[in-house]
Amino acid sequence: MSEFKQVTIEEMEAATERLLETAARVGADTYQVRVKNQSPHCKFGEQGVCCRICTMGPCRITPKAPRGICGCDAHGIVGRNFVRFTAGGGATHSDHGREICFELMAAKPEGPFKVSDPEKLLRIAKEWDVETEGKDIYDLAHEMAELAAMEYGKVRGFQNWIKRAPEHTQKLWIDNEVAPRAVDREVSTCMHMTHMGNSSKAEALVRQSLRMGMADGWGGSMTGTEFSDIMFGTPMPVDTEANLGVMKEDCVNIVMHGHDPSLSEFIVNLSDSPEMLARAKAVGAKGIVVSGICCTGNEITMRRGIPMVGNFLAQENVILTGACEAIVVDVQCIFPALGPLTKCFHTKFYTTSKICQQPMSEFIHFTTDNAMDVATQIVEEAIDNFKNRKKDLVHIPQLKAKATVGYSVEAIVKQLDTVTNSQVDKTGTTLPLIECITSGVIRGAVAMVGCNNPKVRPDYLHIELMKKLIANDIVIIASGCSAQAAARAGLMDKAAKEICGAGLKRVCELADIPPVLHMGSCVDISRMVVLASELAKDSGLNISQLPVVGCAPEYMSEKAISIGNYVVATGIETFLGVDPYVSGSSEVTEWLTSGIRDWVEAAYHIYEDHDLDRMTQGMIDCIEEKRAAIGI
Ligand code: MSK
């Protein structure tokens, strides 16, 4: 085992400073400048008390004007804004899942869309009571994709996936009206409830925001995850690297950004082909490096070991290296700044989805009919662009960390089978992990998720919280940009066991895992709630009794709040490092941080001051309280 080499926040910040010098040289606009231009932020917006749902306003709540023109108070305005924020996130994740269904409908044995994990397809068909006997695997895939797409608009009943939860949890959801109906219906209900002249009662609005989140996590996101696995393979552990240093000065660099795994899979395949490598050599490059940002990056690293060049707030940095031949985006989390920024360099900026069309980009519509043509055009044009580099602008910070990624639920279960020393056969269950937790070798688990955000020192909370938690024998499962922060810092290197407490270090050694497990992209937080459900079912406990908490310390997106709502509604205490614009209503804040516990046995903990020590202690205390409550 190699010696552990951490990459520190200070090193990453110094690398960014150096890249900002290039930005200044070429007159490029960057988010750091725009943050200054936008500061201080609007206080009404920050508190969530600005309403522009009708044209009588906009209305803003102040001590002198405690109600909007329609008479709505701060609680109604904040609650409505919170519901709409969630609907934005839930719709976004779910539409991603729907797109995956359409792609699976187009799968055929000769490709390019194929069934890569037939076992998972059969397993899900059985779960959904679909007859599999004697069916061709592609006929079954098409049938299942059709059924999954129909879930978005089903007229009656709840999302199919909720049957995966323990019965106790399902009952709580149904009894408290947070069980998700059709995905599209929940989005419509959110918009309808919050139209002028409808709901203004905090309790009702918070309840719908949870149900909306549930339609995401136990609906659209779970479909996105599971059907992506069927098409592209269920992730298993694979070694890779992370940080800006994965780009290579003597190679063609193609950076994939966004969330959809499809186009990036084809680009990865093509960039390895002898024809493309020969083309790259012909223009003077030694090879082709494909790397990823945000969740497209997470998808291709989990399945293919493709390196992670950065996360959300690093997207401008990759262009500032001057060595990026093409940045290819699909959907979500794409800065509109990329168009003008790429024009300061030779970088080609491709948008590929009708959902994400941006000025100053080259739009090539990626569909199931032209998948390989689009991938080929992009890779060829990126290679040909190598010769257009402005050599005096090229600077790739030499920061890089090793990582082992690919911890789907299936992979975690398989890997931990090696840890048990029991005589009873526990293979294929979460019981070995439960043993580690009940014996106290591992105190508990934290699901670290979400974006980074300039309101918080970027990646500082992600990385420092994880370091403190693993030092306290708490294992981390991570996804989204949080996972990429961990990987860039070296926390997904198996050698990071060196900075763990003795118990977690021992487990890492026995199971041959890093202390921070990469579980995938944002939609893959559905993997985390499935893992929590399996732990509950195997241990006989309720999910809310498990010493497990969720944390999004630096999130910025609507999707993150939708995620927070389904994680908390699943029964997992959830820690936020950024206020979701609810501080303007004591009632909404009270419901979210306490009242909802009566419905779903968990609530939010909001740390507006993003204080590292308080957040760490809050999570440790929560885990220890849960341990004490079940007598372990
Ligand atoms: S990419 S939603 S910045 S985690 Fe999923 Fe990262 Fe947040 Fe986008």
Image: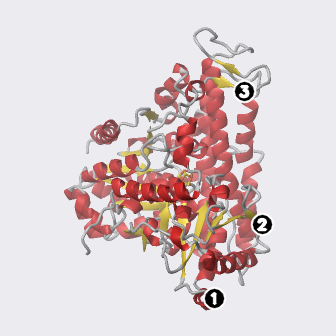
Counting from the top left corner in percent of width and height, residue 453 is at: 50, 45
User: Of residues 22 and 374, which is closer to you in this image?
Assistant: 22
Residue wearing tag 3? 52
276 on left or right of 398: right
Residue 587 higher or lower than 630, as above or below: above
Structural crowding at the residue carrying mark 3, measured as other residues with C-alpha within 10 Å and reported as few (<14), some (14–19) or many (≥20): some
Counting from the top left corner in percent of width and height, residue 336 is at: 66, 52
CA gap between label 3 and label 2 equals: 34 Å
Structural crowding at the residue carrying mark 2, measured as other residues with C-alpha within 10 Å and reported as few (<14), some (14–19) or many (≥20): some
- Looking at the figure, which quarter contains the N terminus? bottom left
453 on left or right of 351: left
Residue 101 higher or lower than 46, as above or below: below
Q: Earlier in the sequence, mark 2 or mark 1?
A: 1
Q: Earlier in the sequence, mark 1 or mark 3?
A: 3
Q: Secondary structure at mark 1?
A: helix
User: Of residues 327 and 522, which is closer to you in this image?
Assistant: 327
Structural crowding at the residue carrying mark 1, measured as other residues with C-alpha within 10 Å and reported as few (<14), some (14–19) or many (≥20): some
Q: Secondary structure at mark 2?
A: loop
Identity of the residue drawn at 48% across and 66% down: 308
**Given this view, does label 2 or label 1 mark the residue nearer the observer?**
1
Q: Amino acid at mark 3?
A: Arg
Q: Amino acid at mark 2?
A: His
Residue 273 higher or lower than 3, as above or below: below
Identity of the residue drawn at 44% across and 32% down: 608
